[in-house]
Image: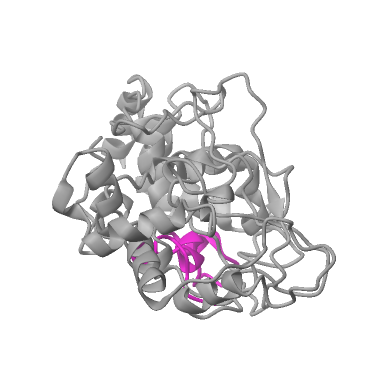
Amino acid sequence: MRAILLFTILCASLPATDWTWNLPKGFPKPQVPADNPMTVEKVELGRYLFYDTRMSVNGKQSCATCHKQELAFTDGQPVGIGATGEKHTRGSMSLVNVAYSAALTWGNPEMTELEKQALVPMMGEHPVELGLREGDKFLPSLSADAKYKALFVKAFPDDKDPINIANVTKAIANFERSIISARSPYDRYHYYREDAAVSDSAKRGEIVFFSQNVSCSRCHRGFNFSSDSVGEHKPNQTPEIDFHNTAVSAGPDKFKAPTLRNIAITAPYMHDGSIATLEAALDHYAAGGRFPENPDKDVLLTGFVLNAEQRHDLLEFLKTLTDREVLHDPRFANPWSSKTVNAKIVH
């Protein structure tokens, strides 16, 4: 016990280590809130919290339950299911490259900060996700854990009592921002000039993707293939956040166009998980939506016609956006697992 106390005191005297992004050409440095700068220590603490089942009222679920690394931090389910068994109305979005997202949910343009968004699954009641409440045993359990005492002191060396909800969300946000995907075949082909990284079919499919006829890029654009990507190259510019009605239903609701990175492994698709396969998703857009006569349908959703070769090539192109390395990178893996317990954050 005395050794732990001495270690904690020593950690408190050491400054946190600034985070280095090591981004490829073409990727801007993400915007980070001034009151929560990226540090190695906060990222590591956030990784522990992200995978900790003490984060839920049933002691069995964590952030990682709905955001699995091997599925590009989605869960493979049509919609999320909370710790109390409540079924949600929307699917779990990928956290890969979430550092670049101007809007953090399917349909709320006001939710723009990861630190605030983390409170929704933690404390939200409509629907219940992790089911935590003020005054429950979550924070006391962290305070009683010697590992967490050291991790919090290292991450927040200037705080007298660092184990609190605000610092929990700051650490989780740091970890989530660190999950950068930039090593897909598409990236190796375009940014690292590896001509053999993608097939000839995929190269033809990229032409289809950006063609005027199909024009997927009108909603899935830029380095992150989404409609709301921001970075430090636009520090004083209000981010453009587009929401679209893609005629999944007959209703008026609009949703953001999420990143297409890793799209081949993040099925099922759409906000409600109602489309099971990537092929079916392509058919949905080719048909102009499930309810093409919806008066609120986005004017960009006009439908298109592809021959068999074009369809195959477009699907092959979409598969080149899969970053296999991010799916298995130990820096993003469960630190409580015996396989990754010794993994260190290397940046």
Is residue 337 magenta-colored? no
The spot of residue 233 in percent (x, y) is: 49, 23
| Magenta region, main secondary structure | loop
- Position of the N terminus, as image quadrant, is top left
Quadrant for residue 208, please give it: bottom left
Q: Is residue 189 left or right of residue 182?
A: left
Q: Is residue 198 left or right of residue 278?
A: left
Instruction: Name the residue rendered at 33%, 27% in the picture.
Output: 11
Instruction: Name the residue rendered at 48%, 21% in the picture.
Output: 158
Judging depth in this view, the residue of 47 and 256 nearest the camera is 256
- Position of the C terminus, as image quadrant, is top left
Q: Is residue 248 left or right of residue 331?
A: right
Instruction: Name the residue rendered at 57%, 77% in the picture.
Output: 78
The spot of residue 275 in percent (x, y) is: 57, 78
Instruction: Name the residue rendered at 60%, 43% in the picture.
Output: 165
Quadrant for residue 300, please give it: bottom right
Is residue 55 magenta-colored? yes
Quadrant for residue 150, please give it: top left
Judging depth in this view, the residue of 136 and 60 nearest the camera is 60
The spot of residue 210 in percent (x, y) is: 46, 51
Q: Is residue 87 left or right of residue 161?
A: right
Q: Which residues are magenta?
A: 52-77
Q: Is residue 134 visible?
A: no
The spot of residue 231 in percent (x, y) is: 50, 30
Say how the picture is coloured. Answer: one colour
Q: Is residue 170 above or below residue 186?
A: above
Q: How many numbered dots are placed on residues in this image?
A: 0
Q: Is residue 284 above or below residue 150?
A: below
Q: Is residue 226 visible?
A: yes
Q: Is residue 289 above or below residue 27?
A: below
Judging depth in this view, the residue of 152 and 16 nearest the camera is 16
Q: Is residue 19 above or below residue 93?
A: above
